[in-house]
Amino acid sequence: MEDYSLEELLPVVATLTEKYTCRDSSSVTYEAANRLMEAVLYCINECNSEGLILHSQRFTAKEAYERGLQLVQDKTCTARKLYNTMGLKFNSYGNENYHDTVTKALPGFFKLYDIRFAPQDSIITMDYPTICPISGVSGIDAVEKYILYISIEQRFLSRLPEDYVLDILYQFDRNYRKQFYNICRIILRDILGHILAGRPMGEALENDDYGRLRAYILGQGKTAAAEKLKVALGKLIDEKYDGDEDMLAYLKADIEDYCTELVYGIERVRR
């Protein structure tokens, strides 16, 4: 991030503080002042992350802050639109945590998110885990990415027969409705297992199949097995999802872990 001295930042924070306290800045607490500084730095970082602060053009701290604040507002609007589009056809497949996160927590974020005075706050805990973890970001950056990941999962699952998805989830864990794991990962791994085993989707894999999968990975090596699955997944995305590159990149992130767990049995991978 472009480095600004405290001397450059303080006037920006002072202006924000006046708005926060309705021009009674003497009443602001030390903790509140720190949070307002964080808000300013968050917006400046937004400006920088968009590549707007160039070596050939140095914005003042005020200019960088104002541009970053506008970017936060734009991202919030974009994220809300993506959420609204996803919400029209959202299917939790009966998982209560998934349902509550999408239908209650995310609307709560948009209701409570303070773009001007606390853009750095994510507000919600994002209890439903996504295949790619949300790390290193906060505020709208985190929530926008979270909604994007969930919308990718929904697009992936929506092209599969609902009965098929529910059957896999039920066979995996009869109590799946109460659990806090990722729904899409279970379906994806069932599909990947069928690809490796050479069995049609929907045909139950037997214990012997998993033994052969483990032997195959041990024989070929995890790297070779993962590459085979990535190619197969790419073909599936091309055929069923119009070559959705975002979806492919997101789902591929689970393949290495899946191969590892097939070998070492870190968690249950069978239906």
Image: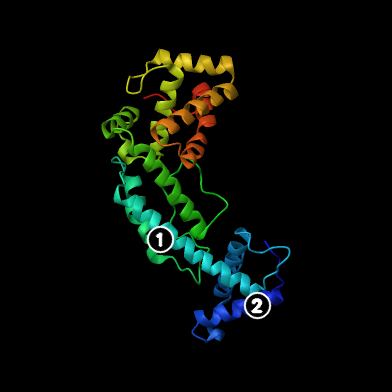
Residue 115 seen anywhere in this rendered image of the structure: yes
Using the rendered view, name the quadrant where residue 166 is placed: top left
Residue 37 seen anywhere in this rendered image of the structure: no
Q: Is residue 10 above or below residue 254?
A: below
Amino acid type, mark 2: Leu
Relative image position of residue 53 (x, y in whole percent): 66, 64
Q: Is residue 48 above or below residue 247?
A: below
Q: Which mark is residue 10?
A: 2
Residue pointed to by mark 1? 109
Tell me which colouring the rendered structure shows. Answer: rainbow
Between 129 and 157, the one lying in front of the other is: 157
Q: SS at mark 1?
A: helix
Q: SS at mark 2?
A: helix
Which image quarter is the C terminus in? top left
65 sits to left or right of 134? right
Relative image position of residue 147 (x, y in whole percent): 43, 51
Which image quarter is the N terminus in? bottom right
| Disc with the residue nearer the chain's start (1 vs 2) | 2
- Cα separation, mark 1 vs mark 2, equals 29 Å
Task: Name the residue rendered at 40%, 59% in the picture.
Answer: 80
Task: Name the residue rendered at 50%, 79% in the picture.
Answer: 20
Amino acid type, mark 1: Phe
Between 233 and 14, the one lying in front of the other is: 233
Mark 1 and mark 2 in contact? Answer it, CB < 8 Å: no
Task: Name the residue rendered at 30%, 51% in the picture.
Answer: 88
